[in-house]
Structures are given as C-alpha cells and as structure tokens.
C-alpha cells in the first residue's frame, strides 16, 4: 500500500526527524492523543496517513483515529487519475479498516465523485465495518445505480447519530428491513433516494424516536410507488423537503400525499409541485416556514378563467397556510401568490385566516395583478409584520392572453378596480425590495405607493440592486419616480444597496 511504502522509504528520515524533535522541542507531538485526533479530524485519511513519517510519535497515530474521511479527489492528487489509481483508492480504504485498532468510529465519510462506479460490495463492506465499530456519523456520497443495497444492520445501529446518503443523479431504492431500531439517530439527510414501500418507509421515520433534523432532497416518492409518505417523528425540529421540479420523469406519475406529524417542528422548508397534497398536523411550534411551490410544465393555468386545476391548487396552498398560521417567519414563492388570489374568485377571502405571530415576511413574486392582490390580502391578515421583503422575479412563462408585453399594464388597471384596500400597518419598520429594475416597473411603483401610504411607522426602506453596469440610467429614473411618492411615515429613510436582502 501507498502509506506502507512511504513508511519503508523514509526510515532514515524518521531518525533524523526524532533528533530534530528532541533538539527543538516538538510541542505538537507532546500533546495527548485525543488533542492530536482533533487536529487530524478535518483531514482526509490520505493526508492523515502521510503524517506517520513525521516521527515515531506519529507513526501509528492514524490507526487510532476515530474520524475517517475518504475523498477520491484528494486521493487522486499528484496522480494521473487512471483506473488503477481509482482501484488503489478502494484498496486504501480496505487497508485503513484492516489496520484500525479502535472499537468506536465517530465519523465515516466517503466521497466519490466519479463516473466509474465503485464496486457495491466494497461500499457495503465498509459500511458494515463502520457499524461494527459503533459508528456515530455515517456520510456516503457517491453516484451509483438503483441496484445498490444498504446493509440491513445499518438500520439497527445503536450508536448512529447522523445518517447522510447522497447518490448522484440516479435514484437508489431505499430497501428497509422489517425491524428498525435507531434509538439515538438525530440527523437524517437523504438525496436521490427512492421510497418504494409505504409501510416500511413510515416505520423508518417513526422508529427514529429522537430524530431532530430531516432533509429529503430530490427523492422519488411518486404515487405509483406509494400513496402516502408519512413522516411521524415526535422530536423532529427541522424538516426540509426539496424536489427537482424540472425533472421530466416526474410528469405523469402522479403525486403521493405527504403527511407530517411533528408536534415540536420549528422550521419547515418545502420545494415541490403544486400538484402534491401536504397535510401538516399539530404545527403550533413552527417558527420559520419557506414554501416554494411550482406549477408543473404540463399544466396550463389560465389567469383569465379560474380552472378546476387552479381551484384545486389554491385550496391546497390555503390548507398549508392555515396549518402554519403560527409562524414568525414566512417565505412564499410566485406561484403560491398566483393561485390563491386568481380572478374572478379570491380564494383567500373564503377562509378565516390570521397570521398573528408573523413578524418577518418574504415574498418572491412577479408582481402581476393577481400577485399584488394576494400580497395586499396577506398583509391585511398579518398586521404585526415588522419586516417585509419583496423580491420581484422574472416570469419565465407568459400565460396572460398570450401577450407578454401587455401583461403588466393590464394588471395595473384591474387592480384599481378590485376595491381591496391595504389596511394601515402599525408595526412595519423595515421594507426591502429586490429586482425593481428588471421586471414590471409600472406595477412596482403602484405597489410602492400603496405600501408607503399605509406603513405608519416605517423606519427604513432598502432597494436591493443587482450588480449590473447598465443599471445607472434605470436606477436614476426609478429614484425620480420614488421621490414623487409621499410616504405616510415621517421617519422613513431610503437606501440603495447591492447586497442580497437578509433577515
């Protein structure tokens, strides 16, 4: 092996190194093993093994290191990256596990970013070896095919606290055993995983009795696989569900329903299709919610007439908003604003909804006619909001009468005729807006005039501008129009910044 050869070829250097250590006083080498392990914990195992040539003090230190990081990119440095070099990487991992003389592994991290696939049986054996050594954190990140199977013993690991699995662009089916016991697992991160068994998937989540953080990223839980994805975790605090909404193989499969039972949930981030139904039970502990729902490319939502599909989507969105009504921080995406307030029926007006605890509201919007009405209504039912950030986005698809250039001006005239006034805002102190120079400038000015005349205690308005060398003329025109608006708050200050809005 590479590290064995290095040790043999540097025997003379060890002696001279020892003499130099003795004369100069190597303070680092005098540290106890546990402190040296902390120093080495952030290094790749190749670098760790190379430290064995420093002195006799370091020669066998790597064998007792409880943190095992294996990164193919680091291993291939100073090599040609041939197939043999990649085979040596697998042999290197084998040898490290063989020579390890510890019974407890704190962390095992495998990162393999290469088209040439790792042998499944090797990865399987490494995971088993880590489990036998009472691994606490397991992070496997490598592209593979659906045929890869995780060892069942992983799901009865009594020491496992963190589990992170990422499998590239192809889905890997999560095959689960009947018996699952993960009594100390607190963090689960799954990417490119396919859930195929509803009962065992539900049992997997419910068996994580102390799970606090769960991320489901770009996973497959289509309707043809399971009807419901049930996430029932009594201690869950943070949940992220993000799906690849641009992935074409989603379309036509249908959507399973996502049911979330987490009484102590504090934060929720969801990015999915409008076609999926979310049921959130007992969410009174939620503090921060980010919802990014998008329309499927195959669906044609007509803004002129309220189609059955749009009604269905609107009802789903309102159901989710009702479930998270106790949040303090809320972020919403453009399509949500579009479907919940679409003429001729304003779906938000049909339900009794109040965001009494909401203090920070961030809206990503096209600022079209329907969006302005939705924002107005949201502000009217969120009277305690202190921070409002509006990010004006470009609309990729024009669906208003088929005339893209006509879209914005039509929205303005209709808004004045709807008769939905903005209530006085007695708590709004900070307002930030981004994207004002690129999209829908007429509607921006209309919206600003409405807001500034109702924000009674507004202290600061910030216009976040993009780093665009051609923005000066447009920005000057915007300043001139802004000066024509007389804000109701006498203490408001106007600022222009190039940084992104934060709250």
Image: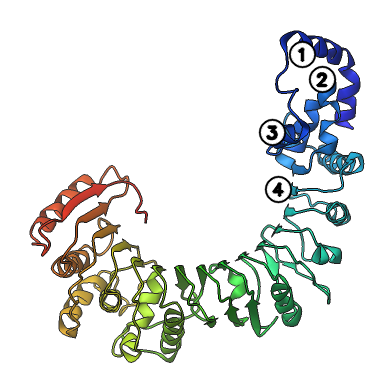
Residue 321 x/y as whole percent: 42, 79
Q: Dot 2 corresponds to which residue? A: 55
Q: Label 1 near label 2: C-beta < 8 Å?
A: yes
* Circle nearer the N terminus (2, 1): 1
Whether residue 142 appears in this view of the structure is no
* Circle nearer the N terminus (1, 4): 1
Q: Dot 3 corresponds to which residue? A: 39
Q: Dot 3: within a 10 Å radius of its alpha carbon, few (fewer than 14), some, or many (20 or more) residues? A: few
What secondary structure is found at the residue carrying circle 1?
helix
Q: Quadrant of the C terminus?
A: bottom left
What secondary structure is found at the residue carrying circle 2?
loop
Whether residue 247 appears in this view of the structure is yes
* Circle nearer the N terminus (4, 2): 2
Foreground: disc 4 or disc 3: 3
What secondary structure is found at the residue carrying circle 3?
helix
Q: Label 1 near label 3: C-beta < 8 Å?
A: no
Q: Dot 1 corresponds to which residue? A: 21
């Amino acid at each position: 092996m590479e590290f064995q050869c290095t040790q043999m070829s540097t025997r003379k250097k060890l002696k001279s190194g020892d003499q130099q250590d003795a004369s100069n006083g190597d303070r680092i080498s005098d540290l106890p093993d546990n402190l040296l392990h902390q120093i080495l914990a952030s290094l790749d195992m190749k670098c760790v093994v190379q430290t064995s040539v420093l002195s006799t003090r370091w020669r066998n230190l790597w064998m007792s290191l409880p943190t095992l990081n294996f990164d193919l990119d680091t291993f291939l440095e100073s090599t040609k990256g041939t197939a043999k070099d990649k085979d040596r990487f697998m042999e290197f991992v084998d040898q490290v596990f063989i020579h390890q003389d510890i019974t407890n592994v704190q962390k095992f991290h495998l990162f393999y970013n290469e088209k040439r696939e790792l042998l499944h049986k090797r990865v399987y054996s490494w995971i088993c070896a880590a489990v036998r050594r009472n691994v606490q954190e397991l992070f496997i990140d490598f592209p593979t095919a659906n045929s890869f199977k995780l060892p069942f013993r992983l799901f009865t690991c009594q020491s496992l606290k963190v589990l992170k699995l990422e499998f590239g662009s192809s889905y890997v089916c999560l095959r689960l055993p009947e018996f699952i016991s993960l009594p100390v697992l607190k963090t689960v991160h799954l990417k490119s995983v396919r859930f195929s068994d509803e009962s065992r998937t539900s049992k997997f989540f419910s068996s994580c009795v102390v799970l606090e953080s769960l991320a489901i990223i770009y996973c497959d839980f289509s309707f043809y696989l399971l009807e419901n994805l049930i996430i029932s975790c009594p201690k869950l605090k943070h949940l992220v569900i993000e799906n690849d909404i641009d992935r074409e193989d989603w379309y036509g499969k249908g959507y399973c329903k996502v049911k979330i039972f987490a009484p102590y949930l504090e934060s929720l981030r969801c990015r999915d299709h409008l076609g999926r139904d979310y049921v959130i039970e007992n969410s009174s502990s939620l503090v921060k919610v980010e919802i990014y729902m998008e329309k499927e490319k195959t669906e044609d939502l007509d803004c002129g007439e309220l189609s059955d599909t749009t009604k269905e989507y609107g009802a789903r969105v309102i159901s989710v908003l009702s479930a998270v009504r106790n949040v303090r921080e809320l972020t919403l995406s453009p399509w949500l604003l579009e479907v919940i307030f679409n003429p001729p029926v304003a779906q938000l007006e049909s339900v009794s909804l109040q965001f009494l605890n909401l203090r920070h509201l961030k809206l990503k919007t096209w600022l079209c006619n329907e969006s302005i009405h939705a924002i107005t209504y949201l502000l009217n039912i969120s009277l305690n909001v202190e921070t409002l950030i509006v990010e004006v986005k470009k609309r990729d698809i024009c669906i208003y009468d088929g005339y893209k250039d006509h879209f914005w001006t039509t929205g303005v005239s209709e808004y004045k005729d709807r008769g939905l006034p903005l209530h006085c805002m007695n708590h709004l102190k900070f307002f930030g807006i981004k994207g004002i120079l690129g999209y829908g400038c007429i509607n921006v000015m209309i919206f600003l005039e409405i807001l500034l005349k109702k924000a009674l205690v507004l202290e600061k308005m910030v216009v976040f501008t993009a780093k665009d060398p051609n923005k000066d003329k447009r920005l000057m025109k915007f300043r001139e129009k802004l000066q024509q608006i007389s804000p109701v708050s006498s203490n408001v200050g106007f600022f222009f910044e190039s940084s992104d809005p934060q709250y």
